[in-house]
Amino acid sequence: MPTYANTPAERSRRPERLVLAVLVALCGLMLVAGFANKDRCAGPGYDAHGVTQPSIGTKQYAEVCYSDIQYLWQARELDRHRFPYTDGGLDARGELTGGSVEYPVLTGMLIWLGSVFAGNDGQFLLVSALLLAPFGLFTAFALGKLTRWRALCWSLAPALVLYGFHNWDLAVVAVSTSGFLALLRWRRPFEQRAVLAAVLFGLGFALKLYPALFVLPLLALTWTRGARVSRVLAAAIAPAVLVNLPFVALGFDGWLASFTFQAARKVDITTNSIWFWAFRPYSNPDNQAFQDAVGLAAPLAVLLGCALALYLGHRRCLRTGEYPFVAVCAAMLCAFLLLYKVHSPQYVLWLLPFFALLRVHPGWIVSYLLVDVVFGIGLFRWYYQIDSGIYDGFAAQAVMIGVWGRAALLAGLFPAFLRAAPGWHTGFVDADHVIPRADLDRGDDQRDHPD
């Protein structure tokens, strides 16, 4: 029988497999460290509801091991193992009740799956970490397939230790990264790649909302390629609708509460946004007039920022002949992170893949990761000190460095991303035909490839 073990094509794949193995292994080590960091807050004792004792809140802040996963075990009564969204809603104070959670339905399902096999918040953290870890590892694999060693921006990011198991964001990052992988690497005609990417972004919307931002640049790219925009748009909408419909039918109020809760959320010390810190003391949560104004101004500012990114992407397309899809997606995400009223610590995970996918100056990457570490550690130490009556000192300064440092860097990354060259290996696909593997093996993949 013939063997392919020593063919040129097979030999060319060996370095790639080694790179992928190293990237996934490094990511795995960071995720283990991330779980160990969060697990420090679990136990050793638990009360009748499975909540860590003693004094879980103080321990989480003092030792910088807080996670939403562990917190929501108590806050959302997950010890009852309720199937999400089928009951509950918002009460008169705007608080979630029953089986409602503040996230879209697929994240709600991940939360429920983790709780079914857990009897306390420590077990819930462990099971949730086991569910989420494959998503983190797949992201390392997908970025490695696209960018080789540039994927170290993900696999060795300190954010994996700080936030890998802070919330459920590893899942949505993996799904959105899969959309870029499908569009840039799948060996099919452009329209098929665009449809698959749209499906994945639609599914991402059912995990966290931000992948919906990427649909508009995808439609713009589709239009410039002469493909059917309506088909790609339908491919994005269909999975989001189909995934949500059963929950709408089973419990409309519980399903709707996940959106209305976020829309009604006030800016305060937990939102970490420029809206709270730039307008002190008018931004106090009890200033309802200000809160109502921000509720309108923040989404409008995000829309304007996204519109500017789309416009500048169009301008670049007129100059170069190719639409910078990935660059526009990255810039739109910067606008969201900078201008929306909530900027949770784990949102940095959303940004990390773009540090690999686009060739921005390493100074941007190092600076952002360092500022994020200062913020991540300072924030929870500050929460702990507030409980003790201390409102100044290094922790408070670290929070300010983090809030305004991230804001300045996001403002700078917006144009930097829009100017950046592709960070992925070019030449995998070319318009609507596939480049033969033999050509790639000879090194013909160094041609310029459109965003």
Image (cartoon, rainbow, N blue to C red):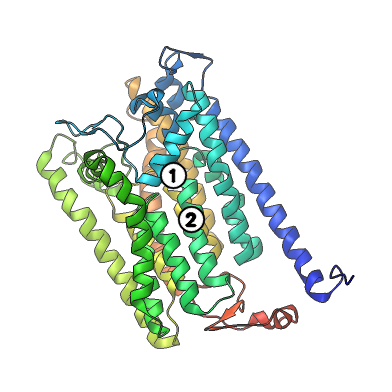
- Which of the two labelled residues, at mark 2 and mark 1, occupies the earlier sequence position? 2
Amino acid on which disc 1 is placed: Gln
- Please name the residue that numbered disc 2 is placed on: 175
Amino acid on which disc 2 is placed: Val
**206 shown above or below 328:** above
* Identity of the residue drawn at 35% across and 47% down: 343
State left or right for residue 20 relative to residue 187: right
Graded by Cα atoms within 10 Å as few (under 14), some (14 to 19) or many (20 or more), the crowding at tag 1 reads many
Task: Tell me which corner region of the image, top left, top right, bottom left or bottom right, holds residue 303.
Answer: bottom left
State left or right for residue 59 relative to residue 28: left
Name the quarter where the N terminus is drawn.
bottom right
- Please name the residue that numbered disc 1 is placed on: 346
**203 shown above or below 117:** below
**Residue 236 visible, this orientation:** yes
Distance from disc 2 to disc 1, alpha carbons, whole Å, reads: 16 Å
> Where does the image place residue 440, in percent across and percent down from the top left?
70, 79
**438 shown above or below 412:** below
Graded by Cα atoms within 10 Å as few (under 14), some (14 to 19) or many (20 or more), the crowding at tag 2 reads many
Q: Nearer the viewer, residue 172 or 412?
A: 172
